[in-house]
């Protein structure tokens, strides 16, 4: 049985005093509502005030939205509390109108599911058709419209089944932040684990975000982010799952060869993009982030239809625009398909990575009878890093202008092509080096930067670029020879 809201009455010396708020036409503060048992009644915060679903409390609906935030109020689903919506399209656990001010916290369970098993091809386990019969279903959904002031946090579990759906979706501009350290599972074609537009704050997507479906994506940052984008959990595109009838079903080759990136960042990010590694610094503990994709779509895609600029983020081995301290992995799964770990650009707009890409963790791509590329569009990636090489070299020479003796081997070797006299303009040196690097093949440029800047051993470079250690050595010899020859006239 639902408990009635508790309302506290205050005594007054004037027994018939009328509240001042009513005299001036201002609505009085609403009483809060706590759900501590099971109910089939949906709530609106304009009537219910702040809503708390406590342990043992549950809102169970056959469809629709369990809690609608249509006023500046908060919603908190505690551990042991739940919101459940059955098999109807256009449904949500929590839906917030655009323009409100709210804090939405889920520490319990939000389940927006259906009872459906897709057909398969013949006697196989390969799905033949859409993964769901329903559409537009959400765990937490901020509707489109005016800027919404919201802090959204999930430490519990969100499960959503439906095509064109999402675990957490913010379709208005957000002044606030989104944090996930819980579990988000989304099943459906073209569905998304966490989706945002413009965010005036940070995105910290940790925990577990697992999606499956044709075109399903774990994280989509579709707008500009004034803070940082941090991946500090497991972001996974699955290729198979257990259906409602208990059988194991697998996506078709067509489905995973026409998919989308597991994690996509298509807007500007002021505070950089980082995939973290487990660490503790200044009493701040980080967990390891990872991104896994299946099929021909990349694990991590940076860039969109418009121009994109990614700012700096401090990582384990330096400051970069995109830092991969954890792991990024792409697996083709089916023979003959190509695999791409990280893709920069290629979506129509240019990508500006002023601080380059730093790989302290791992980036891998795996396939059989196809092409595997750990980092695609190396020109954009490597020219940025090549510029950083020149800048770092120039800084080292200002600290030790007499000679290069005693500098690390990387600077000593690159100093020969880059030493151009103190009176030579830095932009000219950078332009010359970029021109020389441009004469190398993409993989040769990748080898040069990954070895001399990131200090990666031959074996690790070979694994990242899908070439042998011996070929890595040959690329280094070739690259050094060309750079030394090309910069000889600048000594």
Image (cartoon, helix red, strand yellow):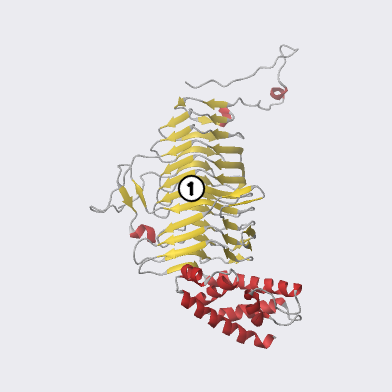
Q: How many marks?
A: 1
In this view of the protein, which residue sits in the foreground, 451 or 242? 451
Disc 1 is placed on an element classified as: strand
**Is the residue marked by circle 1 packed among few (<14), some (14-19), or many (20+) residues within 10 Å?**
many
* Residue at x 43% of width, y 43% of height: 160
Q: Position of residue 389 (x, y in %)?
A: 64, 72
**Residue behind mark 1:** 208
In this view of the protein, which residue sits in the foreground, 296 or 198? 296
* Residue at x 35% of width, y 69% of height: 369
Image-based side of 402 in relation to 181, left or right: right
* Residue at x 39% of width, y 38% of height: 88
Q: Residue furthest front?
A: 406
Image-based side of 115 in relation to 310, left or right: left
Q: Is residue 248 above or below residue 401?
A: above
Quadrant of res 337 = bottom left
Q: Position of residue 383 (x, y in %)?
A: 59, 73
């Amino acid at each position: 049985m639902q408990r009635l809201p508790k309302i506290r009455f205050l005594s007054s010396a004037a027994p018939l005093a009328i509240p001042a708020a009513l005299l001036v036409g201002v609505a009085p503060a609403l009483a809060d509502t706590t759900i501590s048992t099971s109910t089939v009644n949906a709530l609106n915060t304009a009537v219910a005030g702040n809503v708390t679903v406590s342990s043992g409390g549950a809102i169970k609906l056959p469809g629709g939205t369990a809690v609608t935030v249509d006023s500046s109020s908060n919603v908190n689903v505690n551990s042991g509390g739940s919101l459940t919506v059955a098999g109807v399209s256009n449904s949500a656990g929590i839906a917030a109108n655009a323009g409100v001010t709210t804090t939405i916290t889920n520490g319990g369970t939000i389940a927006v599911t259906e009872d459906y098993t897709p057909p398969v091809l013949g006697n196989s386990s390969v799905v033949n058709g859409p993964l769901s019969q329903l559409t537009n279903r959400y765990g937490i959904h901020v509707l489109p419209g005016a800027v919404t002031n919201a802090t959204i946090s999930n430490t519990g579990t969100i499960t959503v089944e439906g095509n064109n759906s999402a675990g957490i979706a913010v379709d208005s501009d957000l002044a606030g932040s989104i944090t996930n350290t819980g579990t988000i599972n989304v099943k459906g074609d073209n569905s998304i684990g966490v989706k945002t537009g413009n965010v005036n704050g940070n995105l910290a997507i940790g925990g577990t975000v697992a999606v499956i479906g044709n075109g399903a994506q774990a994280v989509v940052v579709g707008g500009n982010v004034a803070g940082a984008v941090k991946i500090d959990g497991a972001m996974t595109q699955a290729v198979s799952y257990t259906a409602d009838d208990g059988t194991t079903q697998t996506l078709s080759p067509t489905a995973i060869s026409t998919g989308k990136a597991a994690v996509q960042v298509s807007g500007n990010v002021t505070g950089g993009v980082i995939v973290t590694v487990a660490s503790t610094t200044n009493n701040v503990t980080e967990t390891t982030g990872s991104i896994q994709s299946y099929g021909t779509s990349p694990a991590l895609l940076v860039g969109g239809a418009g121009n994109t600029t990614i700012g700096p983020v401090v990582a384990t081995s330096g400051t970069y625009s995109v830092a991969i301290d954890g792991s990024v992995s792409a697996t083709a799964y089916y023979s003959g398909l190509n695999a791409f770990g990280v893709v920069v650009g290629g979506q129509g707009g240019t990508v500006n990575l002023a601080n380059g890409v730093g790989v302290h963790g791992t980036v891998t791509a795996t396939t059989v009878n196809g092409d595997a590329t750990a980092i695609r569009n190396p020109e954009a990636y490597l020219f940025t890093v090549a510029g950083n090489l020149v800048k770092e070299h120039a800084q080292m020479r200002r600290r030790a202008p007499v000679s290069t003796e005693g500098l690390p081997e990387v600077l000593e070797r690159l100093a020969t092509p880059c030493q151009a006299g103190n009176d030579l303009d830095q932009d000219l040196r950078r332009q010359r080096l970029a021109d020389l690097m441009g004469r190398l093949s993409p993989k040769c440029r990748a080898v040069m930067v990954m070895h001399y800047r990131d200090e990666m051993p031959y074996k690790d470079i070979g694994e990242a670029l899908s070439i042998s250690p011996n070929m890595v050595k040959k690329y280094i010899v070739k690259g050094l020879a060309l750079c030394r020859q090309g910069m000889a006239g600048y000594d």
